[in-house]
Amino acid sequence: MQWESWSAFWDMGGFAAFVWGSYGVTALLVVGELILVMRRRRDTVRRLLRLRRATAAGVNGRRAFEEIVE
Amino acid sequence: MLYANDLACVKGDRPLFRGLNLQVAPGAMLRVAGPNGYGKTSLLRILCGLALPESGEIRWNDVPINRDRETFHRALLYLGHAAALNDLLTPLENLRFSCAAGGDKVDEDICIDALVRIGLAEQLDLPARVLSQGQRRRVGLARLFLGTRRKLWVLDEPFTALDVAAVADLAATLSDHCAAGGMVVLTTHQDAPFAKPPAVLNLAEVAW
Amino acid sequence: MIKDMDKPERSKSLLRFAAPQMFYPLAGRLAPWFAAAAVIFVGIGIWLGFFVAPTDAQQGEVYRVIYIHVAAAWMSMFVYLLMAFWSAVGLVMNTRLSFIMAQALAPTGAMFCFVALWTGALWGKPTWGAYWVWDARLTSQLLLLFLYLGFMALTRAIEDPRRADKAGAIIALVGAINVPIIYFSVKWWNTLHQGASVSLNKAPSMATTMLVGMLVMAIAAWAYTIAITLWRVRSLILERERHTEWVAAELNALEGKV
Amino acid sequence: MSRALGPFAAVLDRDLLLAWRGRADVLVTLAFFVVVVCLFPFGVGAEPNQLRAIAPGVLWVAALLSTLLSLHRLFAQDHVDGTLEQLLLSPEPTVLWVVAKISAHWIATGLPLVVAAPALALLFDVEQSALGVLVLSLALGTPILALLGAVGAALTLGLRGGGMLLALLVLPLFVPVLIFGAGAVDAHLSGSGAQAHLLLLGGGLLGALALAPLACAAALRIAVE
């Protein structure tokens, strides 16, 4: 075990800001990316579902399709 | 002989047509009809190899056009909506450039005769930017009178902005071209006095 | 004209996964496993890096940033080359899935590139007293980030998906050819201006545990990249193939859940 | 206008004629180059040996930015008026007239920069001996910028916000040219000789001449779709 105590661990030999700054931002970015990908998938599926309902309801698939396409 | 098999096209994310087959034999003329937005221009551009179809294949004399691009383009003359005209050049310079760029050997007086015939005698040496929309389209059409040995003519709305006399003259030229064994694929909203009524492909009936 | 790879043949060859319809469920099954592997390896890597590896003689504890910095720098380079590979495959075989793969990789590559720059800066401050130093590797890393941003900006700026795919593929290939050129010219330029003294070399004495820690973190980064890319590919496929019946069927299945 | 000599001569003649008729644009590019170069003394201060030190870099960055700004003129007009479509339908190989277009563009915008550079260098009190190397490095470097820039211009053809996107795409690719271009003059001034830099620029030019038109032709084909 490298560290005498947890507080020494967090202090990281006086470089806490730099080490935890690096790891913290990296963790933030990784988790952020995961959330973004998941949300993107959910939004895509929702948009396609809404699109499908609209085109199914439209009189002529082609006409309704044109109005919906953002 | 132009032959297209099972063509499909999606513009952006709008599906236009699918499973489209067409065949243009020497001497034949095909009119592509259909309301706006059904992909008439897209089909023409796909036939020329300017655009890639979603799926399907196009053959010229039984050779896929992307396999032997040079032979196909040597036999093709495409006139699109834009008249391929640069505003800073005169009609004569523009016409001579499009011939040279297409690899045709055409000397000056033939170009002048073509421009005079299409009704641009006075505008020969004016910069193209002063020309009217109809005059600009005529410079594009002048290439049809140059007697270049291009078999397949693909014309997008050739008759727009032309007066009655020019329409008749152009229709006669197209009919002569077909009579001489050439092929024409065109789109137009007005019926023109062709020697023989063209075959019609209506995109509205081609389901997606 | 187009060798139609999109209709799923029943052949048993791996090529059948080139069809988006076949690849979509496969990606769905594989991604969680890679994600799990990533979590495990990160755990081991952190444990090795922080609790087993000794303190560095010269740099003290701050060198522990190396575990992320090196892994991210490697990944940003590999992901770009992977993008160039998929772009080349896409242009040659005209399979749309290859282009989708390249575009799915780009954001993760850019993220690693930024992480490498960020951790490089935070590591640089205590070791040489400045957040940014025109070190050859850091500078080429910065230019690599511009290449990533250029790729992503171009593919998003073009509405028509097919043109976006091919344009992105071309810039990825052109960029890939230039990456070594940029790297060596920057290296030449760097030694010219500042001499070799100031450069971000690795911690001199690489104790085995440090090395192992770094490798484990690199593997973790690989697993993470594969997982996140597979997920992103799935949503890209859904967007691209929305006209097809199989997407309609897929949407039915998802009707209630979303 | 020359007789029909095939697409290469036709495109080259036409574009040079167009550049001559639209020479206002050429003067604007040149004026921009001069203005940008003159800005630096205001920003950095007029202290002679400092100016002398930064002169090669300033001249090169200004040349790079001028090239970047004029790149949109390469294909935009032809794309709008339909000439690009006709050229792509020409039976002759696309690469042929693409090289012609880029050469005409370089003659119209790159060459004036090379000619103007020595005069501007005098503003920075650069030694006489270094002027030769400066001109040579620009003469070798600006065509590379034009070739690489043409690929970016073709890729961003017809896109809104294309200008910024074009800069983002090509600037990283310009960095090596800038390094060895400006480096050549520095190396000459420091006495270690500029052969290595100039040879590298020459090699880069040949490489770009061989590869860039291919990428540019492919990009044009998809831009017109």
Image (cartoon, coloured by chain):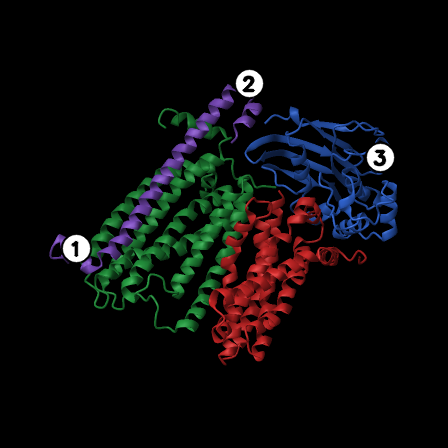
Chain colours: A purple, B blue, C green, D red
Which image quadrant: the N terminus of chain D? bottom right
Q: Residues within 10 Å of mark 2 (few under 14, many from 20)?
A: few
**Residue depicted at 58% across the width and 79% down the height:** D128
Q: Nearer the viewer, residue B172 or D2?
A: D2
Q: Which residue is mark 2?
A: A59
**Which secondary structure, mark 2?**
loop
Q: How many angstroms separate mark 2 from mark 1 (CA)?
A: 68 Å
In the rendered structure, the residue with mark 1 lies on which chain? A
**Residue depicted at 18% across the width and 53% down the height:** A10
The reply to whether the C-beta atoms of the residues labelled 3 and 2 are less than 8 Å apart is no
Q: Is residue C223 left or right of residue B50?
A: left
Q: Which residue is mark 1?
A: A9
- Image: C83 above or below B165: below
Q: Is residue B80 left or right of residue D216?
A: right
For residue C183, the mark is: none
Q: How many angstroms separate mark 3 from mark 1 (CA)?
A: 90 Å
For residue B166, the mark is: 3
Q: Amino acid at mark 3?
A: Ala
Which image quadrant: the C terminus of chain D? top right
- Image: D88 above or below D20: above
**Which secondary structure, mark 1?**
helix
